[in-house]
Amino acid sequence: MNSKRTVLYLLMTICLITTNASCSKNEDIVTKNVAVRGNLRNDCTGTGFSGVSVSFYTRKTNSGISYLTTSTDLKGNFSFTGLDIHSSNDYAYGLFIDTYVRGSTEFDGIGPEDINKEQLSTFFQLSTLATFNNCPLRLPPGISINAPDTFTLTFIQNVLHFYEPKNTYMLTLFPRDFQPPSKLVNIGGYPMGWWNIALDKTKSGIHTIIHDSIYLRFGEDTTYIIPW
């Protein structure tokens, strides 16, 4: 008789433990003072992108989305501290950076994209790219290129190519591209940052190669005079 009671007691205990375990799985556990940190890299320059608004969002089922917003510092770093994170599946969290387009100027946004709650303590390395607005390429005033004089003008953005090796950011221009009356070529909407320039020219029978560079800022309008 005692052995039967013992078995019954054990069975009841196991059932209670199982029931409590299933309940704890559905329980909403709140972890307080969580910090989410990261960095926004500008792939056009290879450095942190400063002054960009970054939002951390909380989406709750049947309650919509709320946002906390901060700006990246001079090194592109950002952080959100003192966060309350709910374990319940009714809550989702993520990062969001808005896209910006104006004329030929463009900034690639990020997300919104949910983050696995177990990874919220990870340092997030985000990356984006942005463009300059317009850079007219001009021949010096009063200059016309007549055969046999000629040139090949090459612009290359090597930094972005490092982060996107499958893409080649290069422009190649010839005298025929600089036809009267304007004698200029407008380039715009290309990645910002350092552009390496090579002018391979033959002038009055003399062949020379001139190397130059220009830094084109986000949204910038500027002019480059070809060193003929």
Image (spheres, rainbow, N blue to C red):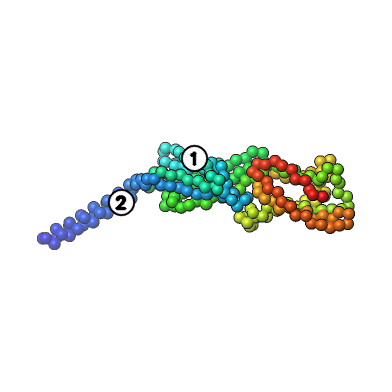
> Which residue in the protein does label 1 denote?
69
Closer to the N terminus: mark 1 or mark 2?
Answer: 2
Element class at badge 1 = strand
Q: CA distance from mark 1 to mark 2?
A: 37 Å
Residue 136 visible in the displayed image: yes
Indicate left or right for 24 with 95 as reference. left
Indicate left or right for 160 with 135 as reference. left
Q: Nearer the viewer, residue 71 or 21?
A: 71
List the single residue furthest toward the front.
Answer: 74
**In the image, residue 196 above or below residue 65:** below
Dot 1, how many residues are within 10 Å of its Cα: few (below 14), some (14-19), or many (20+)?
some
Determine the residue positioned at 77% across, 46% down.
225
Quadrant where the N terminus is found in the figure: bottom left
Q: Nearer the viewer, residue 103 or 146?
A: 146
Indicate left or right for 72 with 2 as reference. right
Determine the residue positioned at 66% across, 55% down.
158
Element class at badge 2 = helix
Dot 2, how many residues are within 10 Å of its Cα: few (below 14), some (14-19), or many (20+)?
few
Determine the residue positioned at 23% across, 52% down.
16
Residue 186 visible in the displayed image: no
Determine the residue positioned at 70% across, 49% down.
214
Marks 1 & 2, CB-CB < 8 Å contact? no
Please tell me the numbered disc located at residue 22. Answer: 2
**In the image, residue 1 above or below residue 83:** below
